[in-house]
């Protein structure tokens, strides 16, 4: 029960949670970056027990898992609050505004969770774009500019959207379920297009656009080839995510 209630089942969610944190740390390292990264990880893991606790309460039942989920949620919420308090003491900027801006997205994901509909596209996109705000929070906490913070959020969010839509399509293909390849194709184009616009509106580096374009070409090609094992798809996405993160960081830090 502890594993089922305490650990998220969305394996790709671990990578999509850690990528924004890693991006923020590479671009703007500080002690606050570390505490915010750990807090983001707790935010991701706390979602599972919170979901079980709220679902059971909504349905008017109190099981053994309900009690465990409530206690675990309380422990993780306390850890998050403590980490944010420590961050507030050492941060060089108002790091909470990215989370405030992302709160409607995170609330949308939770709304779907309570109704046991978290596997739908909308909550998956809302959750990943919302948690991508960690990159912006880390930049602000380290004393970075608002433009750079928004740029890093945009990079992390665009990468997440492209990945989520592609992986969902690949899973459907592997199960011989109805799917639309053009949905994935559109997600790749939107991701690259948003970063292209971000070069002129905020401080998105050209290297990030190139990295997303390369990832997009891979996704466009892979969508038309036989589907490998889902574990391989996951490993590919992790490699792509790290490639986008490191390339973007180099683009920001390079003279």
Image: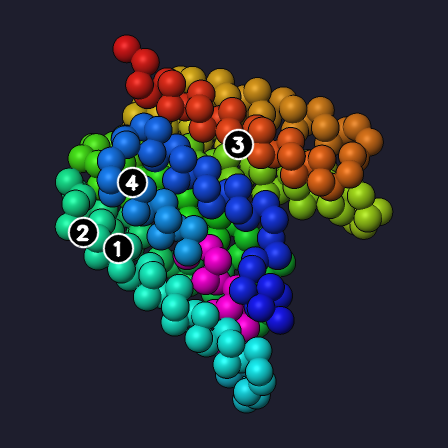
Determine whether the residue tagged by mark 3 lies in a helix, strand or loop.
helix
Q: CA distance from mark 2 to mark 3?
A: 29 Å
Q: Residues within 10 Å of mark 3 (few under 14, many from 20)?
A: many
Q: Which residue is mark 1?
A: 84
Residue 28 position within the rendered picture, expressed as x and y whole percent measured from the top left? 27, 31
Q: CA distance from mark 4 to mark 2?
A: 11 Å
Whichever of callouts 4 and 3 sits on the residue coming sooner in the sequence is 4
Residue 174 position within the rendered picture, expressed as x and y whole percent measured from the top left? 80, 43
Q: Is residue 170 magenta?
A: no
Question: Which residue is pictured at 73% across the width and 32% down the height?
Answer: 223
Whichever of callouts 2 and 3 sits on the residue coming sooner in the sequence is 2
Q: CA distance from mark 1 to mark 3?
A: 26 Å
Q: CA distance from mark 4 to mark 1?
A: 11 Å
On the question of residue 112 being in view, the answer is: no
Q: Which residue is mark 4?
A: 33
Say whether residue 28 is left or right of residue 74: left
Magenta part, dominant SS? helix
Q: Which residue is mark 3?
A: 241
Write the start and end of the magenta stretch as one range. Answer: 43-53
Question: Which residue is pictured at 61% across the width and 49% down the height?
Answer: 11
Whichever of callouts 1 and 3 sits on the residue coming sooner in the sequence is 1
On the question of residue 68 being in view, the answer is: yes
Q: Which residue is mark 2?
A: 88
Residue 53 position within the rendered picture, expressed as x and y whole percent measured from the top left? 50, 76
Could you say which quadrant of the image residue 61 lies in? bottom right
């Amino acid at each position: 029960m502890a594993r089922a209630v305490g650990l998220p089942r969305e394996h790709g969610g671990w990578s999509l949670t850690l990528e924004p944190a890693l991006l923020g740390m590479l671009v703007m390292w500080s002690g606050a970056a570390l505490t915010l990264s750990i807090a983001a990880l707790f935010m991701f893991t706390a979602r599972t027990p919170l979901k079980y606790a709220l679902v059971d309460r909504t349905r008017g039942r109190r099981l053994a898992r309900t009690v465990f989920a409530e206690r675990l949620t309380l422990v993780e919420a306390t850890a998050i609050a403590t980490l944010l308090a420590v961050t507030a003491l050492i941060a060089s900027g108002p790091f909470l505004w990215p989370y405030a801006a992302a709160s409607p997205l995170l609330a949308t994901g939770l709304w779907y969770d309570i109704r046991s509909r978290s596997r739908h596209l909308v909550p998956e996109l809302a959750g990943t774009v919302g948690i991508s705000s960690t990159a912006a929070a880390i930049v602000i906490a380290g004393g970075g500019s608002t433009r750079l913070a928004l740029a890093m959020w945009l990079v992390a969010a665009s990468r997440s959207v492209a990945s989520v839509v592609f992986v969902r399509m690949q899973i459907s293909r592997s199960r011989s379920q109805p799917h639309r390849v053009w949905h994935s194709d559109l997600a790749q184009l939107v991701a690259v297009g948003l970063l292209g616009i971000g070069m002129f509106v905020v401080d998105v580096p050209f290297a990030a656009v190139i990295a997303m374009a390369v990832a997009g070409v891979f996704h466009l090609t892979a969508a038309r080839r036989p589907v490998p094992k889902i574990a391989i798809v996951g490993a590919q996405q992790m490699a792509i995510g790290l490639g986008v993160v490191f390339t973007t960081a180099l683009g920001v830090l390079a003279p």
